[in-house]
Amino acid sequence: MFGRPLLLKRPRGLTGAACRWHRSSLTAELIENMDKKATWDRFYQENMSKGEFRNFEWFFGFQSVRDFVLPLLQAPQSPHAVSRVLDLGCGTSALGPCIFRHSPGPVEVTCADISPVAVQLMQEQAKRSSVQPQNPSSSLDFLELDCTELHRHFLPRSLDLIVDKGTTDALLRSKEGHVKAGQILKQCLRVLKSSKSLVQFSDEDPDARMTWLEEQTLGPGELAADVLVQEVGTLRGVCYFCYQITTRAAA
């Protein structure tokens, strides 16, 4: 069972010029079907038809959340240990590539998405940009993957950090996505190492998200975790939060 939430206020300015998601930018049809692969294939194809590649960022970009993410990668078990990071439902966001680029310690970043269109676009952009990591031992990969089936690609207790910027929100807002959102949460807890974290960035109020998180982890055989909630800041009048869900160390 989850520990009770601790809400820490950490206001931050959310700025940036990249393409941002907010409710008015998506049609009602898209919102209702955000749990479907075909929806996102069409979405990214239509975005690319507008011209040159541009990262599409849910909510905000890396600079707004780097202080929530990078500190979780600064305490490896040994100086040469590589932290394995998953960007869950990456789309065409620059979040994963920015973690790869800015992490001072070695990281193995996997950007995974159900849409092969998004994955191909990101692979092509990575080749064009030739981004160099701060740590020469770091690596970056893009993977087509249904995130309800993380166990098909990742071993249990094999990841050091999972970052979810808008993926769970998209599922919870779609007509048929609630079950998939719960499946993904449970998959994340299974593939995370002991005392490592899933970080969800969301505009959902803690009263609602915490209730959902606790409901999803009640039941026999579920992995225990603790949750810390921090305020990220406000953008266009919407307040955003960081939910850090950390697996408990084995007794």
Image (cartoon, grey):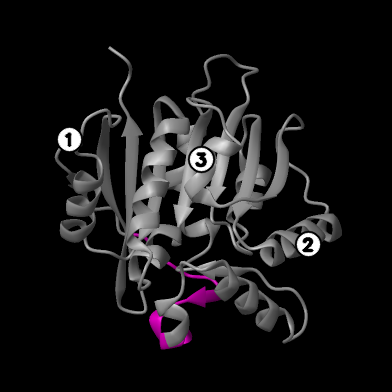
Cα separation, mark 2 vs mark 3, equals 23 Å
Contact, mark 1 vs mark 2 (Cβ under 8 Å): no
Q: Residue at x 71, y 43 (%)?
A: 140
**Residue named by callout 2:** 125
Residue type, label 1: Gly
Give 51 or 10, whichever is nearer the viewer. 51
**Residue named by callout 1:** 3
Instruction: Say what secondary structure mark 1 lies in.
Output: loop
How many numbered marks does the figure carry?
3
Magenta residues span: 12-28
**Which-is-in-front pick, marks 3 and 1?**
1
Query: Residue 70 shows which numbered tag?
Result: 3
Query: Does residue 241 appear to the left or right of 1 in the view shown?
Result: right
Q: Measured from the top left, where is residue 38 in percent x and y?
A: 59, 72
Image quarter hosting the C terminus: top left
Cα separation, mark 3 vs mark 1, equals 24 Å
Q: Is residue 55 visible?
A: yes
Residue type, label 3: Leu
Up the image or down, 148 lies above or below 235; here it is: above
Query: Does residue 149 appear to the left or right of 137 in the view shown?
Result: left
Q: Measured from the top left, where is residue 221 in percent x and y?
A: 27, 28
Q: Residue at x 31, y 74 (%)?
A: 238
Instruction: Say what secondary structure mark 2 lies in.
Output: helix
Residue type, label 2: Gln
Give 197 or 33, whichever is nearer the viewer. 33
Cα separation, mark 1 vs mark 2, equals 41 Å
